[in-house]
Image (tube, rainbow, N blue to C red):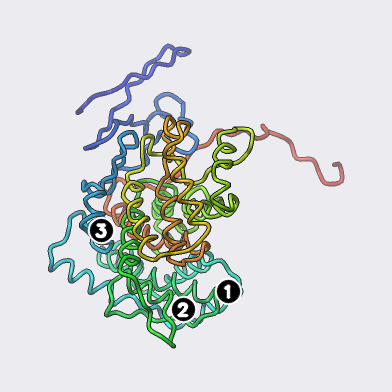
Amino acid sequence: MADQTVQLTDSAANKSTALPVVTGSLGDPALDIAKLNKETGYFTFDPGFVSTASTRSAITFIDGDKGVLLYRGYPIEQLAKQSSFLEVAYLLINGELPTAAQFGAFDDEVTHHTMMHESLRHFLNGFRYDAHPMAMLCGSVATLSAFYHDTLDIADPEQRRLAALRLIAKMPTLAAAAYRFSIDWPVRYPRNNLEYVTRFLHMMFEVPSEPLQLSPVAAKALDLLFILHADHEQNASTSTVRLVGSTGANPYACVAAGIAALWGPAHGGANEAVLKMLGEIGTADNVSKAVEKAKDKNSGFRLMGFGHRVYKNFDPRATIIREMCHKVLADLGVNDPLLDVAMKLEEVALKDPYFVERKLYPNVDFYSGIIYKALKIPTEMFTVMFAIARTAGWVAHWLEQHNDKDTKIGRPRQIYTGATNRDYVPLDKR
């Protein structure tokens, strides 16, 4: 829509301003308000930036009304069925699916950056014995900048690429080390003869006294979850990475900031909240009562893992992972009362008119929490798992940002509501 504008009229001043229309390849158009204050004296007010496009991006597209999620134009359904997490990471970073040779080279590079410096392993010992794994992950990722200070020139494309590779490679190593420290197990080094997800599971659960018997379904389920969580447009943690990145901060600091944002229960902690809710319900016999309680707005009780802020119809990721969730439970034969609660809750909610009419279907957080629980991944590690997957999206956005000549330091405005001008009163007069 070249040269299209929308007229903004200030009725009080009897003045109109033409706002240019900005369009992308998909999605709703936006109004360019960059010169709005200069021309009108007004700023815009948009709490949570829910109606504001902060950047142009070619990485991920979401249509919440239609339940569409595209990575670089590829439907998530196709990638989930045919691809792998590491191939998806390549796609997000480079914009195209790799050839066999390109993927082999990428896989080899990632594999040979999985080790963490031995001093960093000792650094983990400085945490309290009961430190939360997310606290350890956030701190250790930020610390990577101290180990790679000689390759932090963000003006150098090769150094940027190398940092992205290191983050994707080392995140599982750091995550597994944080978990094992939290249960007082010795850290396991990465086995580079294994592929990405299997290698991570070995670092998590293998003990020196016996080999790990790993279910292929478990590895496939985790790889699928990593694909589904790899990116999700300008969400809170990705926007945080880009905001910190706009200052010129090093990539490890930027991703550590993303991890901190992801930690919030309204963001990456949602699947942890699902398990806590299931624990509150207690048994499958209590599900019907809990559903009725959730319908009562005055009860204060919410069913976690249902509906989605972005997807107004259905979450396409939940549709994909639901089938895998049932496969995992069947394959592992897990006997866990909380999983019985989850399956009963899913059954009731999918049939109850209250939820169906409001399109409050189970979302990806509901099913991911169940899968993690079935894989014996502890609840406090759920958000860490999310961080491993989302690292692919974070570094893709960070790289894209530094290739965009229009990138400026982020500086949101505010509506000031504090005291107006006051005179200082000396301490002895107060």
Residue furthest front as drawn:
285
Q: Residue at x 49, y 72 (%)?
A: 178
| Position of residue 416 measured from the top left corner of the image (x, y, whole percent) | 59, 34
The residue pinned by badge 1 equals: 127
User: In front: 251, or 279?
Assistant: 279
Residue 279 position within the rendered picture, expressed as x and y whole percent measured from the top left:
58, 54
Q: Are marks 2 and 3 in contact (CB under 8 Å)?
A: no
Q: Give the quarter of the figure containing the N terminus.
A: top left
**Of marks 2 and 3, which one's residue comes earlier in the chain?**
3
Looking at the image, the residue that sits furthest to the right is: 428
Query: 336 or 145, which is in the foreground?
Result: 336
Q: In the structure shown, which secondary structural element does the residue marked by tag 2 occupy? A: helix
Q: Amino acid at mark 1?
A: Phe
CA gap between label 1 and label 2 equals: 12 Å
The image position of residue 93, as x and y in percent, is: 26, 58
**Secondary element at tag 3:** helix
| Mark pair 2, 3: CA separation | 28 Å
Numbered disc in front, either 1 or 2:
1
Left or right of 376: which side holds 78? left
In the rendered view, does 300 fall on the left or right side of 345?
Answer: right
Above or below, comparing residue 49 to residue 322 in the picture = above
Query: In whole angstroms, how far apart are the C-alphas of marks 1 and 3?
Result: 34 Å
* Residue kind at label 2, given as amino acid type: Leu
Please tell me whether mark 1 sits on a helix, a strand or a loop. Answer: loop
Report the disc number at residue 120.
2
Q: Which residue is mark 3?
A: 88
